[in-house]
Image (spheres, helix red, strand yellow):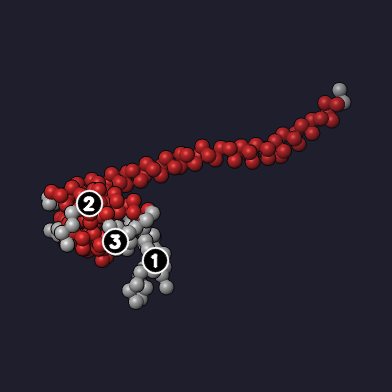
Amino acid sequence: MSEPRANGFRRRREDGARTEDCDVDAAMLLDLTGALLSAGVGVEAALERLAATVPGAEPLAGVHRSLAAGADWATAWSGLDVEGRSAQQLGAFADQLAFAHSTGAPTAELLEVGARQLRTERRHGAERAAAQLGVKMVLPLGACYLPAFVLIGVVPVALGLLPGALDM
């Protein structure tokens, strides 16, 4: 049986099968690709190794096969059969990796910068969502806590003062 891990991936079952599809992280893929390029591995071989070892990156094997068969970069990536967050992450990965593939230059540093940029964008998105959540929470808080404060805090005080005010 699989156990959740801290990074969101699940362990492989004992028979080697994956327990479920995992979302991939483009920044992590860029870091790993940069490390592979620094070690002297080509872009196509890096795609093959990522597909074989990174949970959720299995669609990269199809891209590798297309590139090995002679397809151009755009055609190879157009065949991805992925939806949701994984499609966005693999698309961002492809956009960052396109320059390295088209020039053939070892661009590990550029991939590291791209990974940092993707992480910064993700952090800014999370901060923006948190700020929007604060604004959205004002209405429920006002609708629930203000009447409760009036009923628990103001009404008893007013009722306590009412007999003294009527005696005058």
The furthest residue to the bottom: 15
Residue 111: x and y in percent read 21, 49
Q: Residue at x 15, y 55 (%)?
A: 38
Above-or-below relation of 8 to 116? below
User: Camera-side residue: 110 or 155?
Assistant: 110
Between the residue at mark 1 and the residue at mark 3, the CA separation in whole angstroms equals 14 Å
Which mark sits nearer the N-terminus, 3 or 2? 3
Task: Give the label on residue 3, or none.
Answer: none
Where is mark 2, residue-wise? 74
Q: Which mark is residue 59?
A: 3
Q: State whether residue 26 appears in this view.
A: no
Q: Is residue 141 above or below residue 18?
A: above
User: What is the crowding at mark 3: few (fewer than 14 residues within 10 Å), some, or many (at least 20)?
Assistant: many
Q: Upstream in the sequence, badge 2 or badge 1?
A: 1
Outermost residue toward the right in this view: 167
| Residue situated in front as seen by the camera: 6 or 15 | 15
Q: Is residue 116 left or right of residue 159?
A: left
**Alpha carbons under labels 3 and 2: distance apart:** 15 Å
Residue under numbered circle 1? 20
Q: Amino acid at mark 1?
A: Glu
Please name whichever residue, 158 or 127, is drawn nearer the observer in this view of the structure: 127
